Image: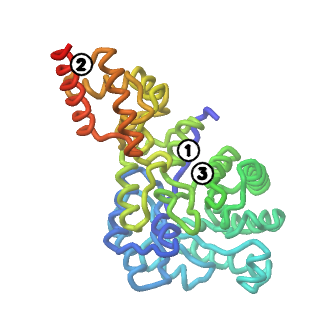
C-alpha cells in the first residue's frame, strides 16, 4: 500500500458526534470546533442538520460564513424540503441519507426498495440541479442485501451523486468482511466510496482502514470517536493509522490532536480516558523499568511516534515498576547525580512507598525520600 493515494477526511463531530445520547454543543462551541477541524486539515465538515431549524440551522449558516478552506456539508433525509433547508444555509455539499437494509425499509421507513430508490434519485437530482456536491448515504449498508446495495449505488451514480457513504450503522462489520464487500461494490459500480463506521465491537478504525485498502477514498470520523452508542471511527486514530500503518500521510496538523480532543471532550462532557489511543495522557507514560530504560536510551524502542507529534509529552513515571536508570534520570532533572548504589537503595524505598500508596510517586515525594535517605546515611556514618 505504498502509493501516495489521496484519502479525504469528512468529520462529523458536529452531526453524528452531537447525535450521541446526552450530548449538546452550544453554537459557540460548534463554531470553534469547525475552525479547529479546518485548521487541522479536515477536507469536509458535516456541520449539522439544517431541517431541524432553530439553533441547529443557525450554526450551519454561521459555519458556512466563516469562509473556511474545508467543504461544508449539511445532513439530509432523502426529502426535498431537507435539501432546501441545507441550501438556505449556503453549504457546498449535502449528505442525502436513506436506509438500504430490508429491516430498516420494512420496520423504520415502512417503505419498499423501489420507493427508496425513487426517493434517493429524486433528492439527488434536485441537489445536483442546485450545484452542490452530493454524498448519497446508504444507511445500514452493512446489513443490506449486497445486490440491492449495488443497484442503489448504480442509481445514485446515474443521478449524479459524487460519492456513496457506506454506513456500518450498527457497527457489525469486521475488517475482512469490510474489505471484500467494499472491493466488490467499487469494482461493480465504480463510484467513490466513503467509509462510515461505528465502534460497537471496537472495530470502527480497523473497518475504516479495511475500506481504504479496498479502494474507498473518503473516511468519515469524529474527534475522540464521539458518536452514538460506542461511537464512530476516531479522527486521530484514522489519521495516525493511515500514516503509520498504511503509509498514507495526509499532512494533518496532528500536533493539535490533544488540544482538539480536550476541547471536544469538555464541550461534550465526555471524559477523555488516560488509555485513549493516540491522545490519552498515558500514551507516552512509562513506568516499568525495562520500558523506561529503553525509552530513555532511544524513544523508538517503546514509542511508534514522538509525543510532540500529537501534542503530548513523554513522562517517565516513578513507581513500583521503576528501575534504577529511570530513578537516576529523574534525579538528574533536579541536578542530583546518583551513584549506582544510591539509585538502588532509593529504588527500594520508592517501591515500598508506591505499594503502600497504591500509585506512582510525585516528584515532591521523591525529594522527601532522597532527603531521608541522605539524612540516615549521614547518621549511620556518624555512628559508624
Ligand atoms: Mn453514524
Q: Nearer the viewer, mark 1 or mark 2?
A: 2
Q: Is residue 105 left or right of residue 372?
A: right
Left-right relation of 243 to 255? right
Disc 1 residue crowd, few under 14, some 14–19, many 20+, Cα 10 Å:
few
Scheme of image coloration: rainbow
Report the quarter where the N terminus lies: top right
Q: Farthest residue toward the left?
A: 382
Helix, strand or loop at label 3? It is helix
Which quadrant of the structure image shows residue 139?
A: bottom right
Earlier-in-chain disc, 3 versus 1? 1
Which residue position is annotated with label 2?
337
Where residue 152 sits: x, y (%)? 75, 68
Mark 2 or mark 3, earlier in chain: 3
Q: Which residue is mark 1?
A: 6
Q: Secondary structure at mark 2?
A: loop
Q: Which residue carries the number 3 mark?
A: 205
Amino acid at each position: 500500500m505504498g502509493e501516495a493515494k489521496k484519502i479525504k477526511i469528512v468529520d462529523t463531530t458536529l452531526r453524528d458526534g452531537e447525535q450521541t445520547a446526552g450530548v449538546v454543543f452550544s453554537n459557540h462551541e460548534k463554531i470553534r470546533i469547525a475552525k479547529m477541524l479546518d485548521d487541522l486539515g479536515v477536507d469536509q465538515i458535516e456541520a449539522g442538520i439544517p431541517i431541524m431549524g432553530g439553533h441547529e440551522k443557525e450554526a450551519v449558516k454561521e459555519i458556512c460564513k466563516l469562509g473556511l478552506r474545508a467543504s461544508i456539508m449539511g445532513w439530509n433525509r432523502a426529502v426535498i424540503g431537507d435539501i432546501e433547508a441545507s441550501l438556505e444555509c449556503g453549504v457546498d455539499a449535502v449528505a442525502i441519507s436513506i436506509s438500504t437494509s430490508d429491516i430498516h425499509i420494512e420496520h423504520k421507513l415502512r417503505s419498499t426498495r423501489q420507493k427508496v430508490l425513487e426517493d434517493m434519485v429524486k433528492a439527488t437530482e434536485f441537489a445536483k440541479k442546485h450545484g452542490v456536491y452530493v454524498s448519497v448515504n446508504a444507511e445500514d449498508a452493512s446489513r443490506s442485501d449486497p445486490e440491492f446495495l449495488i443497484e442503489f449505488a448504480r442509481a445514485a451514480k446515474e443521478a449524479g451523486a459524487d460519492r456513496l457513504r457506506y454506513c456500518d450503522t450498527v457497527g457489525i462489520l469486521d475488517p475482512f468482511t469490510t474489505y471484500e464487500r467494499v472491493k466488490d461494490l467499487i469494482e461493480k459500480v465504480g463510484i467513490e466510496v466513503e467509509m462510515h463506521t461505528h465502534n460497537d465491537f471496537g472495530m470502527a478504525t480497523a473497518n475504516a482502514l479495511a475500506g481504504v485498502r479496498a479502494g474507498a477514498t473518503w473516511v468519515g470520523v469524529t474527534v475522540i470517536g464521539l458518536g452514538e452508542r460506542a461511537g464512530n471511527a476516531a479522527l486521530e486514530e484514522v489519521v495516525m493509522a493511515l500514516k503509520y500503518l498504511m503509509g498514507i500521510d495526509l499532512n494533518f496538523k496532528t500536533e493539535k490532536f490533544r488540544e482538539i480532543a480536550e476541547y471536544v471532550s469538555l464541550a461534550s462532557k465526555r471524559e477523555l480516558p488516560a488509555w485513549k489511543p493516540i491522545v490519552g495522557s498515558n500514551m507516552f507514560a512509562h513506568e516499568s523499568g525495562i520500558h523506561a530504560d529503553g525509552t530513555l536510551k532511544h524513544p523508538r524502542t517503546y514509542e511508534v511516534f514522538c509525543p510532540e507529534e500529537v501534542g503530548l509529552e513523554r513522562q517517565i513515571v516513578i513507581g513500583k515498576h521503576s528501575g534504577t536508570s529511570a530513578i537516576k534520570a529523574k534525579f538528574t532533572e533536579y541536578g542530583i547525580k546518583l551513584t549506582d548504589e544510591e539509585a538502588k537503595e532509593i529504588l527500594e524505598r520508592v517501591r515500598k512507598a508506591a505499594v503502600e500508596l497504591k500509585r506512582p510517586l510525585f516528584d515532591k515525594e521523591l525529594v522527601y525520600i532522597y532527603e531521608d535517605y541522605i539524612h540516615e546515611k549521614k547518621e549511620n556514618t556518624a555512628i559508624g
